[in-house]
Amino acid sequence: MSGNSFGLLYCVSSFGESHGPAYGGVVDGCPPGLALTDQDIQKELDRRKPGSSRHVTQRRESDTVEILSGVLEGRTTGTAIGFLVRNEDQRPKDYSAIAQKFRPGHADYTYYQKYGVRDPRGGGRASARETVVRVAAGAIAKKYLRERYGVLVRGYLAQLGMHTIEFRDWGEVDRNPFFVPNADQVQDLENFMDALRESGDSCGARVNVVASGVPVGWGEPVYGRLDADIAAAMMGINAVKGVEIGAGFASILQKGSEHGDEMTPQGFLSDNNGGVLGGISTGQDITVSIALKPTSSIRLPRRTIDTQGRAASVETKGRHDPCVGIRATPIAEAMLACVLMDHALRHRAQCADVIPPLKLDNPRKIN
Amino acid sequence: MSGNSFGLLYCVSSFGESHGPAYGGVVDGCPPGLALTDQDIQKELDRRKPGSSRHVTQRRESDTVEILSGVLEGRTTGTAIGFLVRNEDQRPKDYSAIAQKFRPGHADYTYYQKYGVRDPRGGGRASARETVVRVAAGAIAKKYLRERYGVLVRGYLAQLGMHTIEFRDWGEVDRNPFFVPNADQVQDLENFMDALRESGDSCGARVNVVASGVPVGWGEPVYGRLDADIAAAMMGINAVKGVEIGAGFASILQKGSEHGDEMTPQGFLSDNNGGVLGGISTGQDITVSIALKPTSSIRLPRRTIDTQGRAASVETKGRHDPCVGIRATPIAEAMLACVLMDHALRHRAQCADVIPPLKLDNPRKIN
Amino acid sequence: MSGNSFGLLYCVSSFGESHGPAYGGVVDGCPPGLALTDQDIQKELDRRKPGSSRHVTQRRESDTVEILSGVLEGRTTGTAIGFLVRNEDQRPKDYSAIAQKFRPGHADYTYYQKYGVRDPRGGGRASARETVVRVAAGAIAKKYLRERYGVLVRGYLAQLGMHTIEFRDWGEVDRNPFFVPNADQVQDLENFMDALRESGDSCGARVNVVASGVPVGWGEPVYGRLDADIAAAMMGINAVKGVEIGAGFASILQKGSEHGDEMTPQGFLSDNNGGVLGGISTGQDITVSIALKPTSSIRLPRRTIDTQGRAASVETKGRHDPCVGIRATPIAEAMLACVLMDHALRHRAQCADVIPPLKLDNPRKIN
Amino acid sequence: MSGNSFGLLYCVSSFGESHGPAYGGVVDGCPPGLALTDQDIQKELDRRKPGSSRHVTQRRESDTVEILSGVLEGRTTGTAIGFLVRNEDQRPKDYSAIAQKFRPGHADYTYYQKYGVRDPRGGGRASARETVVRVAAGAIAKKYLRERYGVLVRGYLAQLGMHTIEFRDWGEVDRNPFFVPNADQVQDLENFMDALRESGDSCGARVNVVASGVPVGWGEPVYGRLDADIAAAMMGINAVKGVEIGAGFASILQKGSEHGDEMTPQGFLSDNNGGVLGGISTGQDITVSIALKPTSSIRLPRRTIDTQGRAASVETKGRHDPCVGIRATPIAEAMLACVLMDHALRHRAQCADVIPPLKLDNPRKIN
């Protein structure tokens, strides 16, 4: 196994390269009986797909998914779900200028050194186009979690460069090209992105993801912790450099008397822990925040080396997202959904017969 | 598997509870031929052990390790290394006052709800005493990495509450009770901790860990990424709420032209990526930073519920670290070492025959 | 994970159903740099494919493989190899007569009870057509093992019903429709099969597989034993009910002085152990023998129940192999190759630096 | 991971050597709430332990188990169960005569070549004493399976050299030193073993294991098949060279009309499939049969080589079982129990919400 699968019981295996014929994957472990059609996956892929606004890459991909197995007459059978997304707009030629050079901050250098092979076509396997597989797998997980447990996994863009976005309304998130929960800030972001694109540079972003309705008890202590698996899933998304759960880095400055979430029979009084204690869900919202670095493929010239190790200058002319964080919201949601799905199954494997002894009125309740 | 093992090829399995008879573990996958004695592990355990200053828990444990297998005549044989650390200073009675209540911010609530079982003796399996196993496993990994690859894994306390520590000298780290790399700040920290302990409250902390000398090419792309596994390992340490690699959350505010680390034939010109690109090591220092929340067991009264779900007040009188972050440095080092060890083996499994095509003069070089 | 992947480091994930649109898989962990084309896989698929003689199922499938990723300019890149084999001759109608009944000895009953779903189209996921994925994955493994280590994996039909086949010549195996290593017996087998087909019944078979040139030291002791993994791989082939390694069941009647393979500096004097001792390869030929039960889909009427649990009679009219063992040779070879590949990688992960202390002149030598 | 763990959800990790200080293990994934004491494990260890009759090794070990974690007030807590069995009767000196030579048929040669290390003390990790860990882990699994599902796992010696044993009564099995279900044959076996021991030679054996009461639906199709995992577990027992399920190798000679088990609303009419179809349990008895080779450590002189590769003669004087098969019954039971336990948990992870559509009156019923 060389890193192309994740999940213990809800297991996703992925293949594909940016300018090869197709991406695809296998979702293994989905319970039988879930109503599932191509459309259930397609609608999530459409949220992630390129070319949906001028602020993201203009590569034209319909990202049409084809389910190849594991579904019979509209319901999952319990066997492996294979699916395929053909690439439609490969332009390997876009990369001829940079085929022999490494982009600063890009994985093409490390792939070359690890495997001894140079796949210059759009980053090959390192391309963020691979996230199409994650979003597909996440779509299935999301649907199961919602229908079986009432769990809702939602995310939004919380910061774009220096622009922090104030959370206002989940309903806004899918009504603008940035996945921001606040219509009033969209125009500012449009202006910012237009100027950024013009400049040839790129910027970083923060995405927040929240899972509501997660029952108490999911997650395994010590090493198989829910928060540890979430951290891996998030840090494993292209360009992510930081992960926080709950109060995150702010907890450094907190006192124990401030951080520890007090409880009443009605529920918790705060959510500094982000819905996870000791690696196990508390029943509160699970709150995750991630930092995405600026895109490494930019038009500005940068010092680098070539495949012969000689000094060189590189500027990337292909079609790229000036901020990979913009399209990251559905990806982060998908990864969180896959982790929760995995732990839903793991929990009931071991603790199928446990009835949680306590029932808080409303665990999520925060005064 | 219920979360008590980690690592694919360098695999650590752990058991033990805070007030049970012993902790222990199995390290599976260590290459044969490594010189190894109890003392190699003991010296790392001694760095972590309680009671070493007035600023940490006063529980008296010698944390003496006994290697039970896998070593013959001072060298590893390639078979499983079993080891044991007996608990010596159990005081289950310390917990009688809180046996029926949950500490805000503590895992005793989630364990109870997940398993339907209440182990009130010092948090049982959730106790940070479990990290004794991680440090032992990390000691073996550290030694192998150093002797076989010249890799050095080191950490330090970078922030204690509002006190940020300026890095000065690795040599200082083990000469003060805080693992800070700066002797001049020790007195301030002593004063701060004395006042904190007096107050009955606790505080958070930041720990930085650095691995130097890691060859280019370790880590697997897509899901088995080196940074993803590091994130899981770190977030899986008790009390950790945030993980950064390289520029971390600061990369949100960076431009691509600033973040992307330029390269010359002599090496990299910066290390915003923290030594990992596309999930694969670059050959630079791997830099990780983690946030630890304040200890949940504090003397101040807090609102909570009891095991019957009734409103209650709790204050914790046992012996506890007022800042779990202080002893976290050797633990974070151990976790990073275990992850690197795992990926060293994984890399050579697949790419044993690859010679990295390029040899930078000094990949770590940063102007 | 619900059983659709196997292998720790050379990991194969599979999907597809007999009468769905396609089979496919992901091979993860293949080392980079291996020369690989569709044709390398196709030639193994052609050995397994249906319709190649009158003695096997007359379903017409070209079993054409398409590699979708992981190969660039004719060489593996080290990333996941995705591949697809479209179904071409689905005839779900063939199954309408048995859609509501269970075939004695067939998995359609257990799938129905496990998943609560009835996929009557040719056994769905239980169909032996799934072995197309195994053969494809095995083709890659075989090629790597041969080119990198000189390992040769070969098999043959050793018994067909009561007809035992005397081994004569590897060269014969691919020159007859039965994979028997003895041209003189082919006519008898043809006659036997013609009569069997006529009768509407089916028969069992034995297949032997041999791996030559395996270096000493592959396999992990205790639970990850090479022989244990081979046993799982073989028993996991459709219709297999028994697995032997080396002397197998005959060793019950052997004395220790007869079974234990004596050694000289020139090599071993016998191979009762089948090339594995303590779960680790000896350097001798690895010899495996498997028993395949008779096909459960037969034309003769049999007592059974229907999906309502009522007594019924069933006879299967579709196109089926009267002896699944006939086409099992390439499948068993593929499974053995995958296991060896996995252990080749696992061995060098842990023991990359070990040089076997002893070099026998010719470990395989058997007087 | 180097082969010292097995099981996906009921995961056993093992350590220890024959003449080191102790064996021990970690059982991870046991559901909480199971009543469990040292004694539950001890009684199974006592069945396996050496020195219980003159027909087995005379090494004197009490094999006393100490549970170190995972149990609180007599019930499992859901956390890792650590346990220890100290070695008491090490006699490394027994091995001085053979320290520099390899026993034909023994793993000491392959260990030496794999790891480059010679542990001459009783086979080190390769010793069958390691099965003490399996029996301990199996004892917990057996208890859970029996109490939660009514599953009974039982085995017996079915053949000793040329002596085949006729099954008569489960009640006899634990009343004689051979685990044979037939009191009338015990005297013959005593005589046979006395003569064998006298001769300095050893013999092979067959052990049958049966699991009754397994619900329909356990096991995962394709690669994670119940029969495949059973085959691995059995072939992974020291000295096992063959595994059969149901009709096993006899199915080669069967016709489909004979092999395929007919069904009626009352149950199955035969059990050729051994309780597994398509890798999934049928609800019938699961019947497994294994072949154990004769002990390789015998008193008779044999040709071999030494650690320098020179021709030598070896005879083994230590205390050894003249037939390892005799003590294999509890070991095989333990392995079967562990596999079933693992699949019980895996099944309910994925299919927790499935109610098997059909309820046969008595699936086990065989006319």
Image (cartoon, coloured by chain):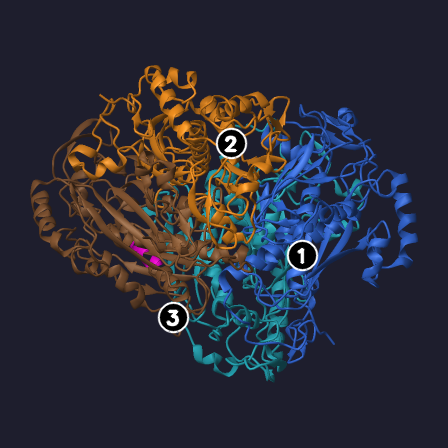
Chain colours: A orange, B brown, C blue, D cyan
Q: CA distance from mark 1 to mark 3?
A: 54 Å
Q: Which residue is mark 1?
A: D166
Residue nearer the viewer, B240 or B77: B240
Instruction: Look at the numbered disc 2 and give the secondary structure of its residue.
Output: loop
- The chain letter under disc 2 is A
Residue nearer the viewer, C128 or D318: C128
Whole-percent x, y for residue C153 in the image: 71, 58
**What is the three-letter code of the residue carrying label 3?**
Ala
As drawn, is B16 to the left or to the right of A254? right
**What is the three-letter code of the residue carrying label 2?**
Arg
Q: Which residue is mark 3?
A: B35
Q: Are marks 1 and 2 in contact (CB under 8 Å)?
A: no
Res. D166 in view? yes
- The chain letter under disc 1 is D
Instruction: Look at the numbered disc 3 and give the secondary structure of its residue.
Output: loop
Whole-percent x, y for residue A256 in the image: 17, 37
For discs 1 and 3, the disc positioned in front in the rendered view: 3
Quadrant location of the C terminus of chain D? top right
Q: Looking at the picture, do discs 2 and 3 lie on one chain? A: no
Residue range (magenta):
B131-138
Q: Which residue is mark 2?
A: A319
Q: Looking at the picture, do discs 1 and 2 lie on one chain? A: no
**What is the three-letter code of the residue carrying label 1?**
Glu
- Residue D105 is labelled as none
Res. D210 in view? no
Indicate whether D110 appears above or below C117. Answer: below
Residue nearer the viewer, A102 or A301: A301
Residue nearer the viewer, A245 or D262: A245
Residue A286 highlighted magenta (yes or no): no
Whole-percent x, y for residue B120 in the image: 24, 42
